[in-house]
Amino acid sequence: MVKQSDRAPLLDWEEIPPPDPKQGAPPPPSSAPRKDDTPPQKSSQPNGLRTPTVNAFGSGWGTSTNATCSQPTRSLTAVVARGDGSSGRPQTVVVGQHFVPDPNVRFFAVKDQWEEKDQIVAVFVVTFDTRSGNMVEWCLPHDINLDGVEFKSMASGSHRITNDFIYFRKGCYFGLACFANMPVESELERGARMKSVGILCPSYTLLYRYMHFLENQVRHQLQCPGQYSPLEAFYEDKRAVLPPAGNGPSCLTWSVTNINRCMHAEMKITHPAGCMSQFIQFFGEQIMVLWKFVLLRKRLLIFSPPPVGVVCYRVYCCCCLANVSLPGIGVSVPELRPFFYINVADIAALQTEMSYVACTTEKIFEEKKDLYDVYIDNQNVKTHRSHLQSLLRLNASDKEKYRKLSEQRQMLLYSQEVGEDYTSNEEDLFILFFMELNNRIFQTLSEVAGSIDPTLTADHVRAMGLDPQGDRSFLVDLLEVYGFDITLVIDNPCCP
């Protein structure tokens, strides 16, 4: 929430400060929940792995965050994501107490508290000029290279909508921009004023903190063009220190430990309540097809007309399908890189990518088949790669897994409706469902690969929750991608 203050001009439009500390700090969490405990309030912050609650929008411009964790019960080693969403070195995480699908399954929580530093590399305003098109109107620092940002932060076709938000990549940085379109009585502006206000950061896990600020600032820029003092104050407080020019690429040096002490960085991207639920309802059983392509580290491109914000969330949801918490898994495979929104300015960058998930509003990408393996147009998932065609067909095992996922969702919704469960949510269920599925597959493959007779049989495949016949092609690709030296002995009915 943002309000206009009566303080100095540079501090106008700042976020509401936190409550007075004299009112007392909240009591520490108890080690065991009581029946009369008040259920926690829902938050717009993602709940992917029950990550610590961060006081995001009520913390003013201070650099500290208030992180609290549930009482731990046991721990395991898991692969920690880097700031770009890729897998990093193994770390120990703690397992919490609740999960609906199976009474023996438990939530993940962070073992200890941490503080994520504010690392704003740039702040900018993009405008649409009737003569010049999209252009960067203003930015800090003034000498930063923002080539292409004017198109990333104002998606093609945005003139048809009133507002939107966009996640994107710029080199080794991630960006978030909020767009707004306001009708004006001006022949010069052809009756409409369009602007975007955005920021760049080395990790997209921090961008959600400033969504409300950017939304208010873009409205402020539409109503009062050229008044940049709130953005200047914001940048002065949040800016990161860039390396000297000429000493390598203009990227911040940061460590996995300092930026992301939690598993799966992509889970901390903000999303509206029910984001995962909408993802499931939108794609239905096709989620199982997407899951296989993501696990095989293919290049996925999602097309949709504006608004693009909700499509950026689909990129995020796709990335969640590939989570694995077993140590050492995926070290040698291409990084799954979320590009979020892309346009024609990203073609050169995409040509060198081996694995990514991205979205676009530009239909021309469909013709550039060398840039992607899988093209998703609404619910239509297709591939031009002949060896991947069989993965588009749902088999009995896929339908059974989707049935279980849907059944578990219904169980969760019912338990929430009757007041039996206030702690679990659909985001937790969705993410952990696929993490367990992936863990079971790779655990089995690891055990077979380490055995005296490294032979994968039909019984092994069924134990992994796969179809020995329908998933044969998927398994062949999976063994090759992840480097498992295993003999697959499953009769192919097509080849006597």
Image (cartoon, grey):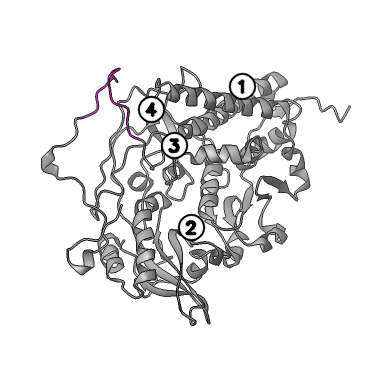
How far apart are the two marked residues, 2 and 4, measured between alpha carbons? 30 Å
Labels 1, 2: front one: 2
Q: Regarding mark 3 in the picture, which secondary structure is present there?
A: loop
Q: Which of marks 2 and 4 is nearer the N terminus?
A: 2
Q: Is residue 336 visible?
A: no
Q: Mark 1 points at which residue?
A: 451
Query: Is label 3 or label 1 in front?
Result: 3
**Which callout, 3 or 2, points at the residue further toward the start of the chain?**
3
Q: Return the disc, 1 or 2, that comes first in the chain's sequence.
A: 2
Is residue 234 visible in the rendered image? The answer is yes
Look at the image and give the residue range highlighted in magenta: 28-41
User: Which label belongs to residue 166?
Assistant: 2
Residue 294 shown left or right of residue 417 in the figure: right
Q: Nearer the viewer, mark 3 or mark 2?
A: 2
What residue is pinned by disc 4?
Answer: 423
Residues at circles 3 and 1 in contact by the CB criterion of under 8 Å? no
- Residue 72 position, x and y percent, is 32, 25
Query: Within 10 Å of the Cα at label 1, are there few (<14), some (14-19), or many (20+) other Cα atoms?
Result: few
Residue that mark 3 sits on: 48
- To which quarter of the image does residue 213 belong? bottom left
466 relative to 115, above or below: above
Mark toward the start of the polypeptide (4 vs 3): 3
Secondary structure beneath label 2: strand
Tag 4 near tag 1, CB within 8 Å: no
Amino acid type at circle 2 is Ile
Give neighbour class at mark 2: few <14, some 14-19, many 20+ (Cα, 10 Å): many
